[in-house]
Image (tube, rainbow, N blue to C red):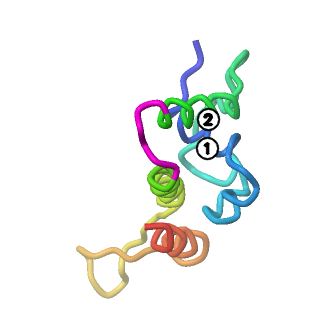
Amino acid sequence: SPERSYHIFYQLLAGSSPEEAQLWETAGGTGAFTLTRQSACVALPGVDDAAGFAHTRGAMDCVGISRADQQQIFQVVAAILHLSNVSFKEREDEHDASVVAPGESADALSAAARLL
């Protein structure tokens, strides 16, 4: 059977509202993040990730997690997605040191920092 990373990442990307996707900077969907893109199986046959996200939210409501706390939790999940896009390169002036690679990596780190 196909395998993929934790389902919450796919659920969040499929089930968040347009406003949440803008807030969390996740509008690019599964193709925008290394964590979800690296899987050979982005979509599982017969699995509705948007419905799964609604179910997850309902379960969180059921156990008493406030909507405000849920938003914060999902914001951290989104930050993890952004962190998956961060890569490093060796510093030219020091052999045992690295820096964030410029471009997409620096942008992803900035997005994660904003969310955290």
Q: Residue at x 34, y 74 (%)?
A: 98
Question: How far across and how far down the image is residue 21, in percent?
Answer: 69, 57
Name the mark on residue 53.
2
Please name the amino acid that badge 2 sits on.
Phe
Quarter of the image with the C terminus is bottom left
The correct choice, above or below, for 92 with respect to 54 in the image is below
Q: How many marks?
A: 2
Please name the amino acid that badge 1 sits on.
Leu
Between 102 and 53, the residue placed more toward the observer is 53
Between 59 and 114, the residue placed more toward the observer is 59
Tell me the chief SS of the magenta region. loop
Which image quadrant for residue 44? top right
Q: Secondary structure at mark 2?
A: helix
Question: How far across and how far down the image is residue 51, in percent?
Answer: 69, 29
The correct choice, above or below, for 37 with respect to 49 in the image is below
- Most extreme residue toward the left, as rendered? 96
Does the magenta run of residues contain 5? Answer: no
Callout 1 environment at 10 Å: few (<14), some (14 to 19), or many (20+)?
many
Q: Residue at x 69, y 41 (%)?
A: 15
The span shown in magenta is: 62-67
- Most extreme residue toward the bottom, as rendered? 93
The residue that disc 1 covers is 12
